[in-house]
Image (tube, rainbow, N blue to C red):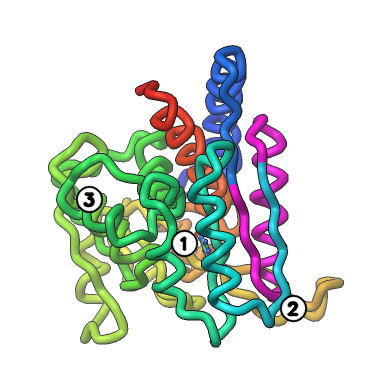
Amino acid sequence: MAARIIDGKQIAADIREELKSEVSALKEKGIVPGLGVILVGEDPASKSYVSAKEKACGDIGIFSDDNRLPAETTQEELLELVGKMNRDPKINGILVQLPLPKHIDESAVLLAIDPDKDVDGFHPMNVGKMMVGEKAFLPCTPHGVVQLLKRSGVETSGAHVVVIGRSNIVGKPVANMLLQKKEGANATVTLCHTGTKNLAHFTKQADIIIAASGWPNTVTADMVKEGAVVIDVGVNRIEDTTRERGFRLVGDVDFEGIKEKASLITPVPGGVGPMTITMLLFNTVESAKRANGID
Ligand code: GUN
């Protein structure tokens, strides 16, 4: 079977159009959603992610308060800025780009963000609410994965989902979201990680594979059941001297091999990637609505 390719760019564009209309309607009520963005240091990948986030805000009418701080910024200075944003009524969401420089305690910074403005969904309060199935800000990449499945017509209820990777940003939350007794979830979830013996034993049983290991070719065609749905969260740079920039992006799965066997598969780039920023916009609009008693 040749797989249908899930067009993440198109699905993300559809959601952004919906959000743009919502933002216009809010503006008529005098409400402008605002996102505070903080980047510490010069990491090139982080800089490009943050620029993309700021541009995406502008495109749909969200105000973004952009703060680029030097790598030497102290934890105290960073916490002060977070505190200022917590108190600023124009700011509905706060995004501190990770990773932070080594001298800053990441969890102390995440803990300082007002949970009602935690549009990344990383604060333990939101993580806990998500886990017990209460309304919470959901972290953007896993929320994007769930939306891709939903909008591609994939039935998750009763399906066996195998997640590969146990990061706090992707693996653990996506597993958690999909096991909830809710529409668009209700799956049987197996979470595999670097401690898993015989990964293929589990992936071969999966109706849906979500790969978030951070390594190219973690999943190859022989590890996939005929007709499975494969969602690739990986973004890995591999050397490619035929490209001007010297590298190309690949995911965590062997796309070329698996696309002959799967029923649906996400490409890299153009699959999960565009959904992450989209769900950040979604959370920021949600937060602005909540702050104004709408919802
Ligand atoms: N670094 C990598 N992914 C993310 C993300 O989703 N949010 C933030 N704040 N930092 C990241």
Q: Residue under circle 3?
A: 129
Counting from the top left corner in percent of width and height, residue 270 is at 60, 51
Nearer to us of marks 3 and 1 is 3
- Give the dominant element type of the magenta stretch: helix, strand or loop: helix
The disc, 3 or 1, on the residue closer to the chain's N-terminal end is 3
Q: Is residue 113 above or below residue 204?
A: above
The answer to which of marks 3 and 2 sits earlier in the sequence is 3
Mark-to-mark CA distance, 3 and 2: 43 Å
Q: Residue tagged by mark 1? A: 233
Q: Tell which tag, 3 or 2, sits nearer the viewer.
A: 3
Identify the residue at image location x=35%, y=23%: 295
Asked if the residue under mark 1 is in contact with the one under mark 3, i.e. CB atoms within 8 Å, the reply is no
Residue name at image x 60 percent, y 28 percent = 32
Label 2 close to label 1 by CB (< 8 Å) = no
Q: Quadrant of residue 256?
A: bottom right
Amino acid type, label 3: Lys
Compared to residue 266, the image places residue 257 above or below, namely below
- Image coords of residue 251 (percent x, y): 53, 67
Q: Which residue is mark 2?
A: 240
Judge whether residue 35 is colored magenta.
Answer: no
**Which is more N-terminal, label 1 or label 2?**
1
Residue 262: tell me if it is visible: no
On screen, residue 46 versus residue 245, left or right, reads: left
Q: With respect to residue 183, does 171 lie above or below?
A: below
Q: Nearer the viewer, residue 175 or 282?
A: 282
